[in-house]
Amino acid sequence: MPSAPDICFDLATLAQDRDALLELNLEYMQWVLAGMAPVFGTPTDRLQDQALADYVAISLDKVCAAAPPRGVFYLIQADGQLAGMAGLRPLDTGPAAGPAAEIKRLYIRPAWRGQRLGQHALARLLADARAFGYRSVCLDSAPFMAAAHALYLAQGFLDCAPYAGCEVPSEFHARWRFMRLDLLAAPA
């Protein structure tokens, strides 16, 4: 059995890491659209009436820009190679719900899947969310992402209604998976 890879979570900034962030976000969105096409009959090269590369470039600031203690975005290195990414950004949920964050772009490249990098990334993001003072964490996940669903359920995430601020277009909500974890109730 091969040994576990040496994992490093590099804090990404748009100023220094824009090229790597664009590359990984575009790769991620291509994977998502390819998985969505058979379910929703959507194109694989466009999103929200834009070329995919344009959508990714425009959304990068919204998805990847939050810095500690409001959010964080990591480039995940495994054995010195860029293996994935994962981020956390603040959500505006209103005062009644308390401060909430959203997990964004937890993505492990195919060559690195099956080595628990996603589990390590999720644990890191949840620890960050607690350290930043969030009371809950939300996420959305496409219907074809069964491995991700299992990972989130194992950590105590529960299905929830679509939440304000999610990136998913409303026409996909009925078949998309939205999940939430109450950090005050979940074991650390």
Image (cartoon, grey):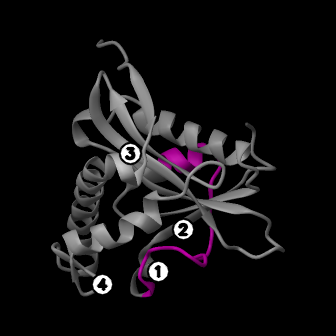
Identify the residue under disc 4.
48
Tell me which label, 2 or 3, sits earlier in the chain: 3
Residue labelled with disc 1? 173
Residue 131 visible here: yes
| Label 2 residue SS | strand
Q: Check the picture and name the quadrant holding the C terminus.
A: top right
The residue lying at 25 percent from left, 51 percent from top is 19
Coordinates of residue 18 in the picture (x, y in percent): 31, 53
Q: In which quarter of the image is the N terminus?
A: top left
Q: What's the distance in space between the residues labelled 2 and 4, CA to CA?
A: 20 Å
Within the magenta stretch, is there residue 100?
A: no
Q: Which of marks 2 and 3 is in front?
A: 3
Q: Are marks 2 and 1 in contact (CB under 8 Å)?
A: yes
Residue bearing mark 2: 178
- Mark 3 is surrounded, within 10 Å at the Cα level, by few (under 14), some (14 to 19) or many (20 or more) other residues, namely many
Q: Is residue 152 magenta?
A: yes
Real-space CA distance between mark 2 and mark 1, rounded to the nearest whole angstrom: 8 Å
Q: How crowded is mark 4: few (under 14 residues within 10 Å), some or many (20 or more)?
A: few
The kind of residue tagged 1 is His
